[in-house]
Image (spheres, grey):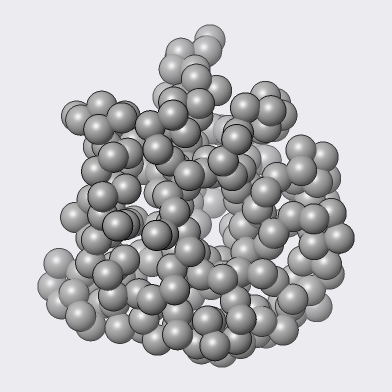
Amino acid sequence: MTTLSVNINKIATLRNSRGGNTPNVLEVAINCQKFGAQGITVHPRPDERHIRKQDVFDLRPHINTELNIEGYPSPEFIDLVIAVKAHQVTLVPDDASQLTSDHGWDTIKHHAFLKEVVARFKAAGIRTSIFVDPVAAMINGAKETGTNRIELYTESFAKLYPVDPLRAVAPFKESALLAHQLGLGINAGHDLNMKNLRFFSDHVPFLDEVSIGHALIADALYLGLKNTIQEYLSCLK
């Protein structure tokens, strides 16, 4: 079964908008695990507009599933991930001011940089994943960095899905088959939601993990966190 990692950045955004500690990021993470999520994802950005560096340290002792930390591999980010001994790190090519991730790495252009970063994390015993578009050259390039996994950037699937589901999912199916052939694990994320997740999961083989935040947290406003997580898990069975 594909595992579900819940991105709790939006919980931190809501907390930060008012100050104080409501909603409580740690409590939400603990409850996500209790309700069945197999991982927690955080994306600490330099401006700390949602998840803060201290949140990462506070969360780590309480994550008994998997802590996945996303981010651009700046020196500060690398030090943070290694210091807390995350289970997985997902490398994204975001700049400091970017609102959200909107493209994968050019794994050919940035080969030397990514290879060096991956080696540092692997030496620390941390599984690495590289955020990529569903493009064969980029997946082959990711393999050459030594990464353990890739994370397929799924926005293009989500946009086309309501119009032509089969055409939307085709490049992701092909990418997953290639990645598996190369010995890479396969994660996916961005704009996956309760409407499209089951179809994506049914059509993309060898899918290890999906990371979902914005849509899941939005659904929880209507359905409650426990019911929402159970609904997302049912899409992955």
For residue 206, above or below residue 136: above
Q: Nearer the viewer, residue 44 or 148?
A: 148
For residue 199, above or below residue 231: below
**Residue at image location 32% in from the left, 39% down from the top:** 229
Q: Is residue 96 left or right of residue 152?
A: right
Pick the quarter of the image with the N terminus: bottom left
Pick the quarter of the image with the C terminus: bottom left
Farthest-out residue, top: 20
Where residue 178 sits: x, y (%)? 50, 87
For residue 31, above or below residue 174: above
Indicate the quadrant where residue 146 lies.
bottom right
Where residue 133 sits: x, y (%)? 48, 75
Where residue 234 sits: x, y (%)? 26, 50
**Residue at image location 67% in from the left, 32% down from the top:** 60
- Please say whether residue 3 is visible from this viewpoint: yes
Q: Is residue 131 left or right of residue 36?
A: right
**Residue at image location 80% in from the left, 78% down from the top:** 112
